[in-house]
Image: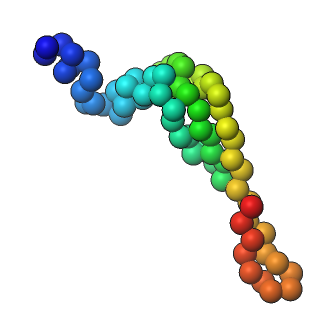
Amino acid sequence: MASTEEESAVKEPLDLIRLSLDERIYVKLRSDRELRGKLHAYDQHLNMILGEVEEVVTSVEIDDETYEEIVR
């Protein structure tokens, strides 16, 4: 039973990624982009292979008349 506990322990940041294999994850990228998908694989450089991916791009515009922010 100790080996199972050791395998599921989070001791380093990459351990959390290892435990997230075959789970749906959320990745925040530069320039207000986000990815949500199932993590299939990764490497030491944090290149990731995701499946069933959904990409969200958020942009903020200023209304010329009211000067209010419009989030899309």
Compared to residue 57, the image places residue 23 above or below, namely: above
Q: Could you tell whether 72 is left or right of 15 in the image?
A: right
Decide if residue 47 is in sight here: no
> Residue at image x 45%, y 22%?
21
> Which quadrant does the N terminus fall into?
top left
* Residue occupying the point 59% across, 32% down: 37
Residue 11, percent across and down?
25, 30
Total numbered labels:
0
Asked whether, in this view, residue 66 is left or right of residue 30, the answer is right
**Viewer-proximal residue, 7 or 13?**
7
Give the colouring mode of the picture: rainbow
Image quarter in which the C terminus is found: bottom right
| Camera-nearest residue between 67 and 31 | 67
Residue at point 21%, 16% (across, down): 4
Residue reaching furthest bottom?
66
Q: Residue furthest right?
A: 64
Tell me if residue 62 can be seen. yes
| Horizontal side of residue 43 vs 2, given as left or right | right
Above or below — where is 70 with respect to 55?
below
| Position of residue 29 measured from the top left corner of the image (x, y, whole percent) | 61, 44
Q: Which residue is drawn at 37% across and 25% down?
A: 19
- The x, y position of residue 7, in whole percent, is 26, 18
